[in-house]
Image (cartoon, helix red, strand yellow):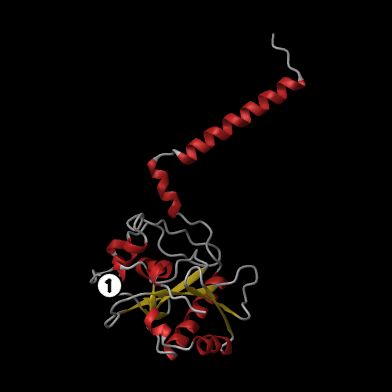
Amino acid sequence: MLRFSLYRLVVLVCVATIVYTTIRWCQILFGRADTDSRHFQHTCNMTEQYRQELEHLFERVHRLLVQHGLTHFLCYGTLWGQIRMAKMLPWREKAEFCVLNDELMRHEEARFIRNFYSSELQIHYLHSEGIYRIFANEPTVRHATPYVELVVFQLDETGTLPKRPLGRHHYTVPMGGIELQKYHYPDNWWKDVKIPAPDMAGSSGPPRGINPAGTLPPFSLPAAVTEPPAAAAPSRS
């Protein structure tokens, strides 16, 4: 009969813990192929108050860019929201506009930034990423603050950009549509996204996966997809 001692009990607990941890890591690292879709399942939606403030901030930034005569269009995650749901994705904490490098360089940066501050907005330029990040001076959401990013983008020629609905407003979108997303997300643009179920704060869109490739008519491939936007970001002092 096996006699248990405190030492043997501790050893057994340690061995069991190591075995369990090893199995769990193997499941995470070498799990079945169908677990890849979990990377696109979002269960933590932002509150309705957060989403409303983000949409309001986005519209304020849009009006300022129009006043400056700057071409700007939806891109990255905000463009995905327009393509898939015609509104911002409910789990995102930010929204993005792409602005053209050549047009931005023709503006005096001090005046450009001053106009944002005079509109009670904070704006910061991140040199390492080539983007402007914009916050409201007095956000109503205290624990997490919505923000808008202006991504400096290089585009050889724009032409007349179309407008598409995003929530209650219409915004300019790139000529490439889904083609531009194929460039920005080469490894997973085709994958279905599981739209979260409605939360207590409000609805979150349809309850099933939506393939982004089938939601928009085809557009011509823009010149932007031949040059990475990050490489074209200016160095503004």
Relative vertical location of residue 30 with respect to residue 237 in this rendering, above or below: above
Residue 14 or 104: which is nearer the viewer? 104
Label 1 amino acid? Ala
Quadrant location of the N terminus?
top right
Relative to residue 155, is residue 206 depicted above or below? above
Which image quadrant for residue 2? top right
Q: Is residue 71 left or right of residue 18?
A: left
Q: Residue at x 44, y 88 (%)?
A: 107
The answer to which of 130 and 32 lies nearer the viewer is 130
Q: Residue at x 27, y 63 (%)?
A: 214
Q: Is residue 82 left or right of residue 18?
A: left
Measuring 53% from the left and 87% from the top, which residue is drawn there? 110
Q: Position of residue 88 (x, y in %)?
A: 44, 70
Image location (x, y in percent) of residue 209: 37, 56
Which residue does the numbered mark 1 point to in the structure image? 223
| Residue reaching furthest to the right | 6
Q: Residue at x 32, y 59 (%)?
A: 211
Q: Position of residue 90 (x, y in %)?
A: 48, 66
**Callout 1: SS:** helix
Q: x and y percent of residue 135 in the render?
A: 57, 77
**Looking at the picture, does residue 142 appear above or below residue 72?**
above
Query: Would you place residue 12 above or below residue 73 in this image?
Result: above
